[in-house]
Image (cartoon, rainbow, N blue to C red):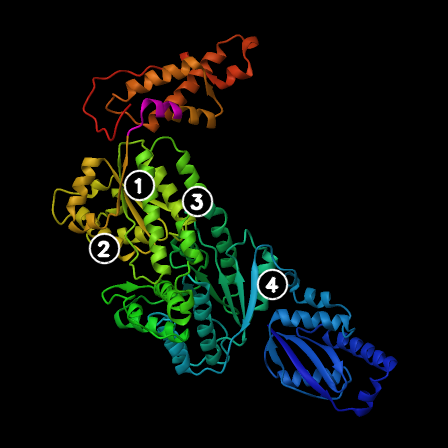
């Protein structure tokens, strides 16, 4: 489907002169309107006029194929009784065409613009879809093959896009065959980069005849709750013969239930229409780099529709340096020694990482070289970086009971990371520091909860891109067969990009045998920690002594740990406060006698070898609620009040079985 505009020059002087008279002009328009309706009746294509000014006439059309467009426009002018020389119709966007359709109705050149939209199933496109953004752009068709390859290299996309361009130009489309052998998945974090990929790809496909429309549609579904089937049908239907780019939602918080209800549902709906139109519309899906769940869902819903993934290259050495120089040239600034040192020769970078480094250098360059009068002035980002951590996760961490030392270390870590932002803003070269941590403490000391909150705090303060938590243990990292462990570890790191990888009981990876699967896992972890430190935090958790052994296992492991966070056992008073908080959330309170007994129970429990800290408090509350239920049911019904139903009494709390005290790991001070 193509949307067109055309112009014509009237050649009948008598007709032109007649239009100067208002009554004659009105009669001419009525005649044109009637004949337009008659011409379009029962046709798949629609032509209409939008404006008449003297000899100059403007018109528009909607066609389902691009054959003989000039002849069809001339035929339309004859059918409506206007002698004119017609220009070659030019493709336009739906938005432009829709406005011309409105103008035609307002100018009385057609009877009903809504009817044309209804007949072509385009009504949903006029009204749009809630939370779904739709835009269009026109692909250029004048660039030659060499120019397209040069643009692919500048993206940079030499590893994936350039080979696909080779395949596209390897053979001209067979004229009689209609269909798309493959569709595309673009994985890049920046929307601008995704657009650049789509532009180069689309222009190559136009040159090769694989798509016929220069108009390219882009449907942004990233913030959509559920696109309607009517809207998707209209968008795909209007894109027949061309390319449709779809920006798909990706999971940012790592919650499986949210993914099932939003991203997966949208991908399922889109997959249905991509299959339905697979030989009439070229689908180009866009996702961030780290999108494993979304990619899996997309492949599952595309059936036998094949996808080619296009992504930015990893840059190292001379390619990374050349990329930075090109950015400087594009911004009309001279390179200097600081810019050259931004890309270390022995490291690999994503283009987005180099752009981020360049932005810091360029910002400093503006204040020191281009506009030196601003050299000493503080910038907004520097002031923002000095502010204390903020966000709901930070507030929740501060409200947690105990964890004084853990909170202090996390606060210092945040201050340290924010300082790096100040360095960057001032143009001082600083590598992004390793953000990896070790959490040491006994079970039930809120290590996992704190790790999850820490991930969210880092996200809310702009230090991590996604802020989700991926929790793993030995069984999730060590595979059963030789050579599989490294790949398994790499997949977990990939899933955690932008967030926190929480490795619980990390010391369980240590084996007595050298060269074992555990050693392979540790070596791969060390390598991935270095390669992915730009947007990932690894937190190792476990008992203090065992964690010390674990860190000694690999010489490079300890040096990559920036912060050691101890989690002390809870005191009896802290456990009482935790119990009250849990009870409050469950809708129950404690009598004064119950609180005294709680403290006695917790003091005794802390001496037991299987003491569970916060878990002990949670289990005690659950048992007390069951005891309370039995007590209330045994009471006289007339004595049961609302307070009775919601208050735990002293008799509801069981005394623990006292075991012989054993040596137990104790961290910090106990009350």
The residue carrying pointer 3 sits among few (fewer than 14), some (14 to 19) or many (20 or more) residues within 10 Å by Cα, namely few
- Where does the image place residue 184, in percent across and percent down from the top left? 43, 66
Residue 667 seen in this snapshot: yes
What's the distance in space between the residues labelled 1 and 4, CA to CA?
Answer: 55 Å
Q: Which residues are magenta?
A: 569-577
Secondary element under disc 3, as helix, strand or loop, is loop
Can you identify the residue that label 2 sits on?
Answer: 527
What's the distance in space between the residues labelled 2 and 4, CA to CA?
Answer: 48 Å
Q: Nearer the viewer, mark 4 or mark 3?
A: 3
Q: Nearer the viewer, mark 2 or mark 4?
A: 2
What's the distance in space between the residues labelled 1 and 3, CA to CA?
Answer: 16 Å
Secondary element under disc 4, as helix, strand or loop, is helix
The answer to whether mark 4 and mark 3 are in CB contact below 8 A is no
The answer to whether mark 2 and mark 4 are in CB contact below 8 A is no
Horizontal side of residue 234 vs 38, given as left or right:
left
Q: Earlier in the sequence, mark 2 or mark 4?
A: 4
Can you identify the residue that label 3 sits on?
Answer: 390
Can you identify the residue that label 1 sits on?
Answer: 409
The numbered dot on residue 437 is none
Residue in the foreground of this view, choosing between 307 and 636: 636
Q: Earlier in the sequence, mark 3 or mark 2?
A: 3
The numbered dot on residue 234 is 4
What's the distance in space between the residues labelled 3 and 2, CA to CA?
Answer: 32 Å
The residue carrying pointer 2 sits among few (fewer than 14), some (14 to 19) or many (20 or more) residues within 10 Å by Cα, namely some
Q: Main secondary structure of the magenta part?
A: helix
Residue 652 seen in this snapshot: no
- Where does the image place residue 659, in percent across and percent down from the top left? 23, 17
């Amino acid at each position: 489907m193509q949307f067109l505009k055309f112009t014509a020059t009237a050649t009948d002087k008598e007709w032109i002169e007649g239009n100067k008279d208002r009554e004659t002009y009105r009669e001419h328009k009525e005649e044109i309107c009637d004949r337009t309706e008659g011409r379009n009746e029962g046709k798949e294509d629609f032509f209409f006029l939008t404006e008449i000014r003297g000899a100059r006439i403007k018109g528009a059309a909607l066609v389902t194929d691009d054959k003989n467009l000039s002849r069809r426009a001339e035929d339309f002018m004859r059918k409506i009784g206007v002698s004119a020389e017609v220009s070659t119709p030019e493709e336009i966007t739906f938005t432009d065409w829709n406005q011309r359709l409105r103008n035609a109705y307002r100018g009385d050149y057609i009877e009903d613009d809504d009817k044309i939209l209804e007949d072509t199933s385009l009504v949903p496109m006029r009204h749009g879809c809630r939370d779904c953004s739709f835009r269009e752009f026109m692909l250029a068709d004048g660039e030659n093959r060499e120019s397209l390859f040069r643009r692919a290299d500048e993206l940079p996309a030499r590893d994936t896009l350039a080979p696909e361009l080779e395949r596209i130009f390897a053979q001209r489309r067979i004229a009689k065959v209609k269909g798309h052998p493959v569709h595309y998945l673009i994985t890049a974090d920046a929307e601008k980069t995704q657009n650049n990929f789509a532009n180069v790809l689309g222009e190559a496909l136009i040159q090769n005849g694989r798509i016929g429309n220069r108009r390219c549609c882009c449907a942004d579904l990233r913030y959509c709750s559920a696109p309607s089937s009517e809207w998707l049908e209209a968008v795909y239907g209007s894109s027949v013969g061309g390319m449709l780019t779809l920006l798909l939602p990706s999971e940012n918080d790592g919650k499986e239930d949210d993914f099932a209800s939003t991203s997966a549902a949208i991908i399922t709906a889109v997959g249905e229409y991509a299959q339905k139109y697979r030989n009439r519309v070229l689908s180009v899906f866009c996702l961030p780099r780290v999108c494993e769940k979304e990619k899996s869902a997309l492949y599952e819903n595309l059936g036998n529709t094949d996808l080619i993934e296009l992504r930015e290259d990893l840059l190292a050495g001379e390619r990374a340096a050349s990329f930075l120089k090109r950015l400087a040239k594009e911004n009309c600034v001279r390179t200097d020694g600081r810019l050259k040192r931004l890309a270390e020769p022995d490291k690999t970078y994503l283009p987005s990482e180099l752009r981020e480094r360049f932005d810091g250098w360029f910002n400093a360059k503006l204040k020191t070289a281009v506009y030196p009068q601003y050299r000493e002035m503080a910038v907004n980002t520097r002031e923002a970086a000095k502010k204390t951590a903020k966000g709901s996760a930070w507030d929740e961490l501060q409200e947690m009971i105990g964890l004084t030392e853990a909170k202090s270390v996390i606060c210092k870590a945040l201050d340290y990371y924010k300082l790096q932002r100040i360095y960057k803003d001032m143009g001082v070269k600083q590598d992004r520091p390793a953000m990896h941590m070790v959490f040491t403490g006994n079970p039930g000391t809120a290590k996992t909860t704190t790790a999850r909150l820490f991930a969210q705090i880092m996200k809310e303060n702009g230090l991590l891109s996604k802020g989700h938590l991926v929790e793993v243990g030995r069984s999730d990292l060590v595979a059963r067969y030789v050579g599989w462990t490294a790949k398994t570890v790499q997949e977990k790191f990939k899933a955690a990009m932008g967030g926190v990888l929480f490795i619980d009981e990390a010391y369980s990876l240590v084996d007595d045998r050298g060269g074992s699967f555990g050693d392979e896992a540790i070596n791969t972890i060390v390598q991935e920690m270095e390669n992915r430190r730009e947007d990932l935090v690894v937190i190792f958790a476990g008992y203090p002594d065992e964690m010390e052994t674990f860190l000694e296992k690999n010489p490079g492991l300890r040096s990559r740990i920036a912060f050691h966070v101890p989690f002390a056992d809870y005191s009896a008073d802290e456990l009482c406060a935790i119990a009250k908080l849990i009870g409050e959330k469950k809708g129950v309170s404690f009598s004064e006698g119950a609180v005294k007994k709680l403290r006695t129970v917790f003091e005794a429990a802390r001496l037991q070898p299987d003491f569970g800290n916060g878990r002990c408090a949670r289990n005690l509350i659950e048992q007390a609620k069951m005891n309370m239920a039995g007590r209330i049911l045994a009471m006289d019904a007339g004595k049961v009040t609302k307070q009775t139903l919601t208050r735990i009494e002293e008799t509801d709390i069981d005394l623990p079985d006292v075991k012989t005290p054993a040596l137990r790991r104790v961290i910090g001070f106990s009350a």
